Image: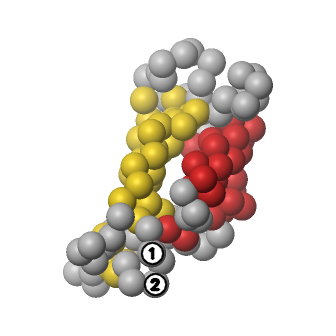
Amino acid sequence: MSDVLYLDPESIHVPGALYSHSALVPVGKKTLYIAGQVGLRPDGTFGATLPEQADQVFRNIKAILDAHGLGFGDVVKMNTYVVAGQKGIEVRPVRQAHMGEHKPVQTFVYVAQLMRPEWLIEVEAIAVAP
């Protein structure tokens, strides 16, 4: 999204991963809120590992973005929730495979459990239409 201003002020630490500290969206943009997506496939099954579930999470988000004529470059904010005990670092290459070098504002949190015990990751996102 070319008219969103991503800014990492020099007066605070440099982001340690693929995210930006802030995103300023111009007035008048349409906003898409994407509910938390888990690693459920369309047939109701899910992978056994964090990377498998993360891959499906990003496939689900892409399908929602596509349905609205948007892409990952239109995402301005993401919240990622990973079950404690998992290796969250395993999400990074999966995310990068889907989103490339795009750096939306990002929060990554470990949680005790998600809605179903077999779910290992949930991601919610906000995108803006060009």
Disc number placed over residue 78 in the picture, else none: none
Of residues 80 and 38, the one nearer the viewer is: 38
- Amino acid at the residue labelled 1: Pro
Residue 73: x %, y % from top left: 54, 70
Q: Quadrant of residue 32?
A: bottom left
Q: Which is more foreground, mark 2 or mark 1?
A: 1
Residues tagged 2 and 1 counted as in contact (Cβ below 8 A) = yes
Relative to 47, residue 58 above or below: below
Q: Amino acid at mark 2?
A: Ser
Quick one: 60 or 80, which is closer to the camera?
60
Q: Would you say residue 47 is visible in this rendering? A: yes
The quadrant in which residue 77 appears is bottom left
Which residue in the protein does label 1 denote? 130
**Disc 2 designates what residue?**
2
Specify whether 4 is left or right of 59: left
Of residues 121 and 29, the one drawn nearer to the viewer in this rendering: 29
Does the image show residue 105? no
Q: Residue furthest top?
A: 117
Residue 52: x and y in percent read 74, 38
